[in-house]
Image (spheres, rainbow, N blue to C red):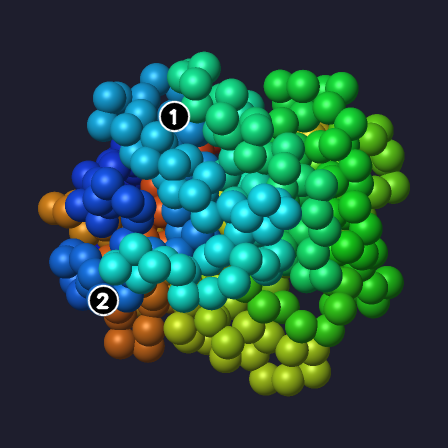
Amino acid sequence: MTATLGTPARLRQAPPPSFAHLSRLTDDTGLLEHARHALARREHGYCTDDVARGLVVAAREAEPSPAVLRLAEIYLGFLTHAQHGSGAFHNRLGYDRRWTDDPGLGDWWGRALWGLGTAAARSPAPWIRQEAMVAFTLGAARRSVSPHAMAFAGLGAAEVLRREPGNALAAALLADAAKAVGWPDSDPDWSWPGHHLAYASAALAEVVIAAGRFQQDVALRASGLRMLTWLRDIQLRDGRLSVLPASGWRRGSVRQRYDQQPIEVAALADACATAAAATGDASWHDGVRQAIGWFLGDNDRGAVMWDPETGGGFDGLTPHGPNLNQGAESTLALIATLQHARRTPPSQRHGDVADPTSR
């Protein structure tokens, strides 16, 4: 399953996103969180975080198959069940169909609004759009103290505004999300708000870019682009992505190289695609190409990070190669990243990714 550094140089075509493994992890309740290799681990149950991301990728399909449309319906049903009347969400549901937590406004609330906003804006099924909008409206009246949660929620608001530019609730949420993220430090060696990069950091830059674009605020958009430029630059090694590890990185500390997580790659692909749309600058498509390349083997270990037989994404890149477990988060990151290959201009088509040995 690995592309070693000794293989001949060649071009590899990015595959279309496969929903086969996502379907394998999905039952009539929701999306099971973990897997051992390709086999779902029922004992770990479900989480709103992953179900919301599942709704994002399913809703992004402009012409979904009946199977993908069914996934969207299951995920939407899960999220509406997880939502409390206050607009907050439960996050963890056991396989026995019992919630193991109280409703809250953590990252899962933000991701739920991201999924609901995407479905409300993009789903070709009117009944999905309508129900997603009802749940989004209830949740969008709340605010979280977490910048990450606010960033994810803001991305859902940006989706709603694509379809309904006059939606005042979504506009207020997007503006508040950008404020929660804050402005990057003026130090060019750490062009980021705060002193710690945690996970899916590109989403924070993306929501600032989206807010600046919607508000026609040149300075705000520029700050988001500066954050994203810096974040992408520090994650490049010899022209390929070397994303921040699961442990993150604190300013002034030694940066670790592993374990690299697919969620970082997918977040960067999304943010670069948003930057390209906001600026018209095609050079941002290079970031999408590099993200796709990471999954196809253009990474620090020259390792292919997905299983073509199952359609599942591997859970992480370790010093010894891929973690071969194929959980929901990594598979969703794979699908989300490959979806971008269909949207880029032919001159920047990221389906043609150079083998790492050709560099």
Seen at 78% across and 27% down, the residue is 168
Q: Amino acid at mark 2?
A: Glu
Q: Are marks 1 and 2 in contact (CB under 8 Å)?
A: no
**Residue 134 vertical position relative to residue 78 in the rendered view, above or below:** above
Disc number placed over residue 61 in the picture, else none? 1
Residue nearest the observer in this picture, 162 or 244: 162
Quarter of the image where the N terminus is located? bottom left
Residue nearest the observer in this picture, 208 or 34: 34
Residue 92 figure quarter: bottom left
**Residue 186 vertical position relative to residue 358 in the rendered view, above or below:** below
Nearer the N terminus, badge 1 or badge 2?
A: 2
Residue 260 figure quarter: bottom left
Quarter of the image where the C terminus is located? bottom left
Left or right: where 43 falls relative to 175: left
Q: Amino acid at mark 1?
A: Glu
Seen at 20% across and 63% down, the residue is 41
Q: What residue is shown with label 2?
A: 43
- Asked if residue 117 shows in the view, the reply is no
Residue 70 figure quarter: top left
Helix, strand or loop status at disc 1:
loop
In this view, the mark in front (1 or 2): 2
Helix, strand or loop status at disc 2:
helix
**Residue 121 vertical position relative to residue 182 in the rendered view, above or below:** above
